[in-house]
Amino acid sequence: MTAYLDSSVALRYILAGETTIRRVLEYPRVISSELMQVECRRVIQRARMQQELSDDGVVEAYRRLDSVLRGIDLVELSREVKLRAAESFPVVVGTLDALHLATALLWARDAAVEAGDTEAVHIFSHDAALNTCARTIGLGVRLGS
């Protein structure tokens, strides 16, 4: 079983210390798109620029991000991922969500071929549209609706 960590869960931990991420890190393998690292760094920088984080808050946010990154495998935004993300989905999702979903979907496809597991990836996200789409395309969803 593999957990797919969406940026929304990572950012709630990074910015506010929310502990939902512990459920994710209990999985034997945790993955995310390399996009997650970019999204998290951009949000930390935006919060700093908008003075939503103090200097100490920025240091703590980067410390938490680094601890998350040490515990997961980042999946490259390959040509195949980008091509799949450009295709249609049964639910309206934005570009970044499409990239996350394509990454998880292709990972699940490869895992299912290797292990015969039809729900090889469990999505952890606070994004309702991403969760609905993930469920609709056959991925396991472990948070929210």
Image: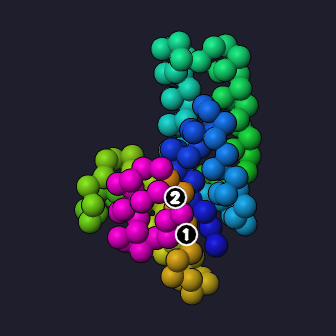
105 or 124: nearer the viewer: 124
Q: Position of residue 21 (x, y in %)?
A: 65, 50
Q: Residue at x 42, y 59 (%)?
A: 145
Q: Residue at x 56, y 83 (%)?
A: 117
Amino acid type at image mark 2? Leu
> Furthest residue to the bottom?
116
What x and y, as percent, mark residue 32? 57, 53
Q: Which residue is mark 2?
A: 143
Q: Is residue 90 above or below residue 93?
A: below
Queried whether the magenta region covers residue 97, the answer comes back as: no
Of badges 2 and 1, nearer the viewer stands 2
Q: Residue at x 57, y 39 (%)?
A: 12
Circle 1 sits on which residue?
A: 121
Q: In the picture provided, is 8 more to the left or to the right than 101?
A: right
In the displayed structure, would residue 35 be above or below residue 26? Answer: above
The residue nearer to you, when weighing 131 against 39, is 131
For the residue pair 119 and 36, the one nearer the viewer reads as 119
Q: Earlier in the sequence, mark 2 or mark 1?
A: 1
Residue 134, by quadrant, is bottom left
Give the class, few, some or many, for how many residues have Cα within 10 Å of label 2's Cα (few <14, many ≥20). some
Task: Report, in whole angstroms, how far the alpha carbon at label 2 lies from the one at label 1.
Answer: 13 Å
> Where residue 6 is drawn, which disc sits there?
none
Callout 1: SS: strand
Q: Amino acid at mark 1?
A: Val
Residue ID at (65%, 57%) = 24
Evaluate whether residue 138 shows in this view: yes
Camera-nearest residue between 15 and 32: 15
Q: Bounds of the magenta span?
A: 126-145
Image quadrant of residue 10? top right
Say if the magenta span includes residue 141. yes
Looking at the image, residue 71 lies above or below residue 119? above
Q: Position of residue 78 (x, y in %)?
A: 47, 56
